[in-house]
């Protein structure tokens, strides 16, 4: 029986151990998923792990938000290569953001960033992307320059799509500054090229040429095929500076995946025309126009670039002397610019409204937090004050009870003493009455002169004095009660008008004794006028 009792006592400890082990394993799984989510090669693994966690456990709301964020990253990496984003990915990241916002998670800034990435690159929603990225910027950590650079780069890209080139250039300059701090030469090349394209769109050709020269100078340090995406811009730079050989080389090596391939083909047409290769020029021109129209119809991303392409095409017709096609192309470019400008204005206004609504919500949330904090502080102060008052009141009550107890004890003692005194008074009163009664006969005998006090005992003298006090109380009012019996009788008889010799006869004492008693009376009598 004792064995089973000992065994049962171990059960709670075993359960706690298993619970802690399970929690530790769960936390390690979440940490592993978060680490894998930053690696595009692990995207499929992350996707499966997240589904497994949701299927076999019940994560908290904050953990669910982190898992949905990791799932969004994985599906983004899986879909970005073929630009085929699954339906509902925007809802997934929005749900993750809402859950992380609810718990003010540290992952919230990362969630805002990926929400902007999904909206911009996945679904062509630059307004929603801009709002999400600006939210991330508001809570940007101070110690992560790499993330800060990526965020500013995305903000520059979004503002470029919205037509706000000033903001786009501003953010790209911030990216360059961060890349220089981190001594990231590749990042500097990419950022300088982005600034070049923005200055080109804004018509600031001198500034654009400055940054293109930096790109050309720095890219030769690296043998990286990724820089081939810059070939169209490099070819245009050389063409505008009349280096047709290099311009042709870079135009011809523009990757097919580059969104500016129509401009590269148009550049080849211009080079061919200047080299008097008319057939090649027409072929390149036709391919450029068909590809530009196809990109314009298929995707929203090229619609902002189309007016620039049409202006370049109009310059080609102008150089060729075809005024009719030039005018038609410029009219189309102007109409598209008006449409794009109107759309950009609407999107910017919508973005401003959304951002203001978000800021208002943040202010309201902050106000509610401050109110809750204030109420909590007030409650703490009130509780502390109440505790202090209660403590002081309890001390006062305890002290009052102690004083009351002492007073009650004192009252009991006093009542006891009063009872004793009453008994003593009653006893004294009865004795005094007996003395007065017994002293009457002695008083009357002395008053009649039939006898004297010679030979009387002290008790007989006290009885005489008691009756005399009863009869002539006024005489004794000014006499000290501490006076002995014989001086008291002398004082009384003296007050009654007896002479010293008569008093000596009545009391049966000598004249010397009378003088001594008179002296004692003078010392002890209350009334100083006694003779």
Image: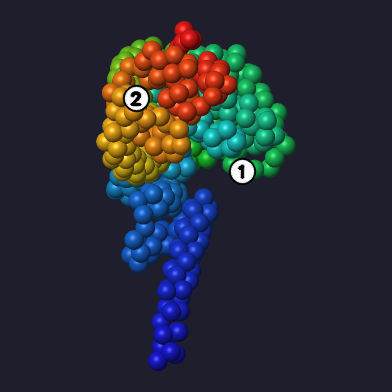
Q: As displayed, is residue 40 above or below residue 223?
A: below
Specify the quadrant of the image occupied by residue 240: top right
Q: Residue furthest bottom?
A: 1
Question: By what rule are the colours in the image chosen?
Answer: rainbow
Q: As displayed, is residue 14 above or below residue 190?
A: below
Q: Residue at x 48, y 22 (%)?
A: 504
Q: Residue at x 34, y 28 (%)?
A: 450
Q: Residue at x 48, y 60 (%)?
A: 27
Q: Secondary structure at mark 1?
A: helix
Mark 1 vs mark 2: in front: 2
Mark 2 crowd level (few <14, some 14–19, many ≥20, 10 Å Cα): few
Q: What count of labels does the image hold? A: 2
Which quadrant: the N terminus? bottom left
The residue wearing badge 2 is 449
Q: Is residue 467 left or right of residue 516?
A: left
Question: Would you say residue 183 is visible in this rendering?
Answer: yes
Q: Position of residue 40 (x, y in %)?
A: 50, 52
Q: Which mark is residue 225?
A: 1
Q: Which mark is residue 467?
A: none
């Amino acid at each position: 029986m004792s064995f089973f009792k000992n065994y049962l006592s171990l059960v709670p400890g075993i359960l706690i151990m298993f619970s802690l082990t399970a929690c530790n394993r769960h936390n390690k799984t979440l940490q592993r998923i978060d680490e894998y989510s930053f690696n595009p090669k692990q995207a499929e693994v992350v996707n499966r792990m997240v589904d497994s966690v949701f299927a076999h456990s019940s994560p908290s709301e904050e953990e669910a938000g982190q898992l949905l964020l990791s799932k969004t990253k994985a599906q983004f990496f899986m879909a970005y290569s073929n630009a085929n984003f699954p339906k509902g990915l925007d809802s997934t990241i929005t749900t993750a953001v809402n859950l992380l916002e609810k718990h003010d998670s540290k992952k919230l800034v990362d969630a805002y960033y990926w929400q902007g990435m999904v909206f911009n690159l996945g679904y062509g929603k630059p307004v929603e992307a801009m709002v999400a990225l600006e939210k991330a910027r508001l809570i940007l950590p101070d110690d992560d320059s790499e993330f800060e650079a990526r965020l500013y780069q995305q903000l520059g890209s979004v503002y470029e799509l919205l037509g706000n080139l000033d903001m786009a250039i501003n953010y790209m300059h911030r990216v360059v500054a961060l890349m220089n701090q981190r001594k990231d030469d590749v990042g500097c090349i990419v950022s300088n090229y982005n600034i070049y394209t923005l200055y080109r769109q804004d018509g600031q050709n001198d500034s654009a040429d400055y940054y293109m020269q930096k790109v050309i100078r720095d890219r030769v340090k690296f043998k990286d095929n990724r820089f081939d995406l810059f070939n169209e811009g490099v070819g245009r730079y050389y063409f505008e500076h009349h280096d047709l050989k290099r311009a042709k080389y870079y135009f011809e090596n523009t990757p097919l995946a580059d969104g500016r391939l129509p401009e590269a083909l148009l550049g080849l047409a211009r080079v061919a025309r200047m080299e008097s290769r008319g057939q090649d020029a027409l072929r390149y021109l036709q391919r450029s126009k068909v590809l530009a129209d196809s990109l314009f119809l298929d995707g929203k991303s090229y619609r902002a670039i189309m007016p620039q392409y049409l202006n370049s095409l109009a310059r080609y017709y102008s150089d060729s002397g075809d005024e009719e096609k030039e005018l038609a192309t410029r009219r189309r470019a102007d109409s598209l610019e008006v449409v794009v400008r109107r759309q950009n204005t609407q999107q910017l206004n919508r973005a401003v409204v959304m951002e203001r609504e978000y800021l208002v919500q943040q202010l309201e949330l902050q106000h509610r937090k401050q109110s809750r904090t204030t109420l909590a502080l007030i409650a703490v102060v009130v509780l502390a004050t109440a505790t202090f008052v209660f403590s002081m009141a309890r001390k006062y009550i305890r002290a009052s009870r102690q004083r009351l107890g002492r007073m009650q004890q004192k009252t009991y003692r006093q009542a006891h003493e009063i009872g004793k005194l009453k008994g003593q008074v009653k006893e004294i009163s009865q004795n005094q009455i007996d003395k007065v009664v017994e002293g009457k006969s002695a008083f009357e005998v002395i008053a009649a002169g039939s006898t004297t006090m010679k030979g009387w005992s002290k008790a007989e003298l006290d009885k005489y004095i008691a009756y005399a006090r009863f009869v002539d109380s006024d005489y004794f009012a000014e006499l000290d009660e501490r006076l002995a019996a014989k001086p008291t009788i002398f004082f009384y008889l003296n007050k009654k008008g007896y002479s010293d010799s008569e008093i000596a006869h009545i009391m049966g004492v000598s004249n010397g004794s009378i003088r001594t008693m008179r002296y004692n009376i003078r010392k002890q009598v209350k009334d100083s006028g006694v003779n």
